[in-house]
Amino acid sequence: MKKRLIVNADDFGLCEEISTGIIKAYREGIVTSTSVVVNGSYFKQGIALLKDSGIDAGIHFTFIGREKPVSGAVDGLVDEQGLFLKGYNEAISKIIAGRFDKDALRRELFEQISILREAGVAISHIDSHQHLHLLPNVSNMIIDLANQFKIKWIRVPRSSIFGIKGIGMNSLSELLKLKMRRYNLCYTDRFIGFEKRGHINEHSLLTLLPDLKYGTTELMVHPGYNASKRYDWKYDWEDELKALTSEAIKAFIKENEIVLTSFKEI
């Protein structure tokens, strides 16, 4: 058995700074896959760049963060301007309580994935902004769409953070695994990068990679050029880009016989 690593960059299509950084990290570094935001401001402009690069691509369902729905208003999950709610806590409380239009969200997710497919992208995997696909009121929709579009991989994130948030994520992840197994859907053996999201650098990679286990691991990353004028996440996009294109990191992977792969290659 080998140590296989999928380095998956979230948020392609969200803006130019992030999207072009992801492609650079793919062409010059260790990124092997990306997840695409079809309702991002750079999606239409960036789709040619995505396809020309040849990078493995999945759908990054986005129904939070003040992005615009592609299918019309989703009652309960949009603000007075018709944009998806910005706040995670507000959105998650409404989703958990079921205080939103489920049919409208189902249409929205269907349209998001349809747009990416119609753009000529072979969709290899599914994940979502802020991991909202873990929530029971959403996960069933996601599984239905995976079956409908014949997509076998869905992200199952994992957290090692001690406390209620970490326990909550891991519990929802285990529930998602149970549902996925009923339909022979796939998830990686391990998931890393949640704790360092937006703040991965060369040092943190050289801490994570030596602990890599046999089997397939997804490493979630967020490379890019500085997008702080657009988003107040306080992410270190450029530090991640430097780390993922670092010669020291590439050498470590080669010396330790880590196999870089992607969802479409497995």
Image: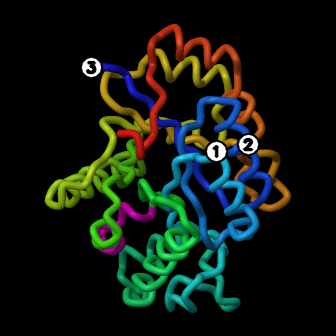
Residue type, mark 3 in image: Met
Q: Mark 2 to mark 3: distance in Å?
A: 33 Å
Label 2: how many Cα within 10 Å (few below 14, some 14–19, many 20+): many
Q: Main secondary structure of the magenta part?
A: helix
Residue type, mark 2 in image: Trp
Q: Earlier in the sequence, mark 2 or mark 3?
A: 3
Residue drawn 51% across and 88% down? 74
Residue drawn 53% across and 13% down? 254
SS under mark 1 = loop
SS under mark 2 = helix
Q: Earlier in the sequence, mark 1 or mark 3?
A: 3
Residue 65 versus residue 72 in the image, above or below: above
Q: Mark 2 to mark 1: distance in Å?
A: 6 Å
Residue 222 marker: 1
135 vs 249, nearest the viewer: 249
Q: Which residues are magenta?
A: 132-143
- Residue 136 colored in magenta in the image: yes
Residue 43 versus residue 82 in the image, above or below: above
Image quarter (top left, top right, bottom left or bottom right) of the C terminus: top left
Q: Is residue 156 left or right of residue 75?
A: left
Label 1: how many Cα within 10 Å (few below 14, some 14–19, many 20+): many
Quickly name the residue at label 2: 237
Place residue 218 in its image quadrant.
top left
Residue drawn 38% across and 86% down? 102
87 vs 155, nearest the viewer: 155
Q: Earlier in the sequence, mark 2 or mark 1?
A: 1
Residue type, mark 1 in image: His
Q: Where does the image place residue 37, in percent across and percent down from the top left?
A: 60, 64
Quickly name the residue at label 3: 1
